[in-house]
Image (cartoon, helix red, strand yellow):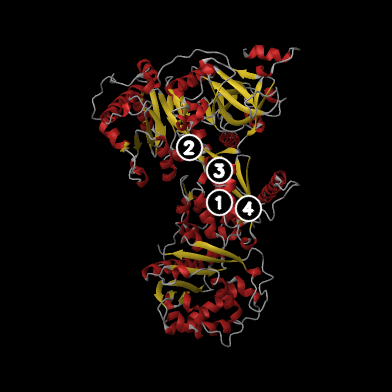
Amino acid sequence: MDLNSFAESLKAPKKIKIKDIFLNGIRRNYNQILLHEKFEKIVEAFPDAKAIISEEGNDTYTMTYKELSLASDKLYQVIFELLKENEYFTKNESPFIAIIMRPSYQMIITILAIWKAGCGYLPLDFNDRSSYIKSILNESKPEMIFIEDFRFNDPNLEDFRVYNINELLEKSKDTISVPINEEKPENSKYKTALVLYSTTYLRQPKGTKISHDNCMQRIEWQWEFYPYSKNEKSCIVHNSNFHIDCFAETWAPLLSGKCLIIMNESNRNDPLKLIEKMEEFKIMRFYGRPMKVQKILEVAKEKKKENSKQLENVKLWISSGEKMPKSLAIEFFNYYNNDGCHTIANFYGCTETTGDCCTFSMSSLEQIQDIDEIPLGLPNPNTYIYILDENLDQVKLGEIGEIYVSGAFLAKCEIISEANRFESKTFYRNSFNLHPTFWTMFQTGDLGYIKNGLLYFESRKDRKCRAGDDYTIDLDELDKKLNDIDYVENAYVTYKDFKILAFIQLKRSYSGKSEKEIQFDLKNILPEYGVPKVNLVFKMPIVDDNKIDIKQLLLEYENHEKEIKRKTLHVNFNFDDVEPDRIEFVKEIFRIIGIRIGFDVKDVISLKSNFFQIGGSKSNIVSCVGDLRTEGFYINLEDFLEAKNFDEIIKKIIKNERMSLFSAKVLTIERNTEWRIQLAYNEDAVEAAELIANYYITKKPLFKFFPNLRKESIIKFVVGNWYYFVEKRLSFKIVGLSNKIIGMCLNIEIQDQKLLEMKDLKEVKPLMDYLVFLSQKFDFKPYKFQKVLMPYMIAADVSLSQKDEIRVIYHLEEYLVEFMRSCEYRLIFAESTSPLTIQLRKICFDYRTFKEFPVNRYIDSQGNRIFQSADVNLKTFIQIYENK
């Protein structure tokens, strides 16, 4: 039954048999040809046409079709000899080679050569963890692994036959090109074109073999239903090459004589750069997930004020990989003024269906006005779609069931079911159609229904979602991972507006932990793309059947986000002096700084503003620079301090998308040549005590809770215990001009803390008891026979400017780490309530936060809550630095 007769049957008054409720695509006879053979036909037709323009770093490489073919022929001979020497073809009927390479022209050469050698290829993400890659290799057992220089010596790959692809490519240059060797295995032995593994974190990934037939059917379908126009010369690839969507994005242009633009890795996820490249090369179609399409349209909308014709050339937008919200389609047509000349298509499919098996195209706003959701659409040619229940019976028309796919696009088999594909839990015999093409059907895991002859998506059966462009996250597994964390009482993970959200209720003993700390912890146990946005809840809302009230959680979250957006409007930016092409760049910097300073900014932020004059302080400057660097805006702390205004700051910022969390911690301040760091001696006691007393009385947060505490009492405590601070030559000072002490760091070994005398110092004793209480929170048993250093008091001259105070405290902390290493101490155990000190240790010197203790919860030995009136956000941090 074709789709037209099926649609008519829905209107007919006769009773419809349940077994007629399915969707089938039209029949097409596509050419059966191997991918590399199709490529060579293009080479014959367009030998001198540009095939690839590849951006790599600051360089650009261009290759014609003839050059690309020649390079792959030469590499093929090197690969084929390796295979022949080891008799691989006799061991494996479908040999394939794993490649760990970055998207580049060299990757295209390598893939073509592998096909010509009669093999398929298994692409692996060079950014993935080595252990994750090893687990895939252990299961898939590729014949060889081709890997680039930068990971060639990875110890996790020692058990495999690994070749440096850069060396093989270099070796191939000296090879004389000859016709492809006819001594190849039979057709059935090299029909696998590629092997793809689902990029699922937390579960064992699943591998799928995809044949040349599958790929050619997918590409020829696209050429027929979404043909290239006469003026379409170039296509852009902005994704990695590790999932099925990128296969068509890469090879559909190359197998039709178009020029493929491979974007630089650092620019690939930058909407502004993508727009610039699309404009430069007059790109006429764009592939991307809904989230990326949305980001590009948002940026383009801002830029459209300057260029009303921006993205006018991009006539076709293809969205896949996630459910397309109707709001995105509306935004799309609004951007193009609903001109009827631009199309957005919703593609549906998965790796096992060679990417896409169902499509729905929209060219005007009127097409979607009367529907609540964007449909998945109609099946592709030679494809059947079934909606089945748990017993593999077809559900009634309009009812929700699981989506099953059958047809020519269906992959060859799964790696786990090489001997018998029907042992897999996702491949089943198709009892509804006995034609060989439809002999097998695949269980997608998606729930859907048929309405008005179109397929609609309802939800995932297993709560999987997309993270970023390339990865799949199983929310149930992530749920379990979070609930296993020792400080988590209850956790629930969900997916909303292209974000993974984690709602966490903490155990009472860990109630002082913050969202940022949990986020940081999760980055140590999850890959970056799998880290959810953490939202702390006091108590999980529960419905009658003792289940989490998800609707209430999301409602509270939405209200919280609305409140943040409302407050954000209080940060005012002035872009009058900013060059038009730098507005987006500057806007993002101002946004990061504005949020760190707080929402109640004293003045409008402009290029002429000074950080300290608009509400910035020593308490947030280090975090502000750290935030900028974490977001990829590289600037040093010294440059930030020295800048007179934001104009100078922005001129020194280098934008680097690959800036990692580690590099964000590498913040330095140059030492003032007029300052000297020296050990503290007996004669320094009185001057140092005076400096410390002044600093602690005026600067330290806890001392305001003791209004009767006199400066003399602190001086008496420091001088009275001076012997213990200098006896082991552990304390040091910074002296400025005229040998005046401007900074002091008093250190002791942790076991000597009990020696400090409090006699006749009743005013100071409560504070010192608090420090002892905090140190008892840490288990020192593992360090019983090792030396542990404790910075007991750190202070700067109160007459210094904010900038110089930051410099002094920074250099004291810097020297403390250097000193600890040189004296072979195993650990620095540090306690502080000062935001500046806490941030310097955490961001600049990589201290680990052991505990945050809210000071208002402290109860002394007499049962008194001496800090009861303290703000709930005032916390003492216990931070650890280990000498590893």
- Quadrant position of residue 459: top right
Residue 258, given in percent of the width and then of the height, sits at 43, 22
Q: CA distance from mark 2 to mark 1?
A: 29 Å
Residue under label 4: 604
Q: Secondary structure at mark 3?
A: helix
* Above or below, comparing residue 726 to residue 428 in the picture: below
Q: CA distance from mark 4 to mark 3?
A: 16 Å
- Quadrant position of residue 340: top right
* Above or below, comparing residue 639 to residue 35 in the picture: below
Question: Residue shown at 51%/23% (left/top)?
Answer: 410
* Above or below, comparing residue 58 to residue 481 in the picture: above
Residue 607 numbered tag: 1
Contact between marks 1 and 4 (CB within 8 A): the answer is: no
Question: Residue shown at 46%/49% (left/top)?
Answer: 660
> Badge 3: how crowded within 10 Å, few (<14), some, or many (20+)?
some
Residue 668, given in percent of the width and then of the height, sits at 44, 60
What amino acid is found at the position of numbered circle 1 in the picture? Leu
Residue 248, given in percent of the width and then of the height, sits at 48, 26
Q: CA distance from mark 1 to mark 4?
A: 10 Å
Residue under label 3: 583
Q: CA distance from mark 3 to mark 2?
A: 20 Å
Contact between marks 1 and 3 (CB within 8 A): the answer is: no
Count numbered badges in the picture. Answer: 4
Q: Secondary structure at mark 1?
A: loop
What amino acid is found at the position of numbered circle 4 in the picture? Val
Upstream in the sequence, badge 1 or badge 3?
3
Residue under label 2: 268
Upstream in the sequence, badge 2 or badge 4?
2
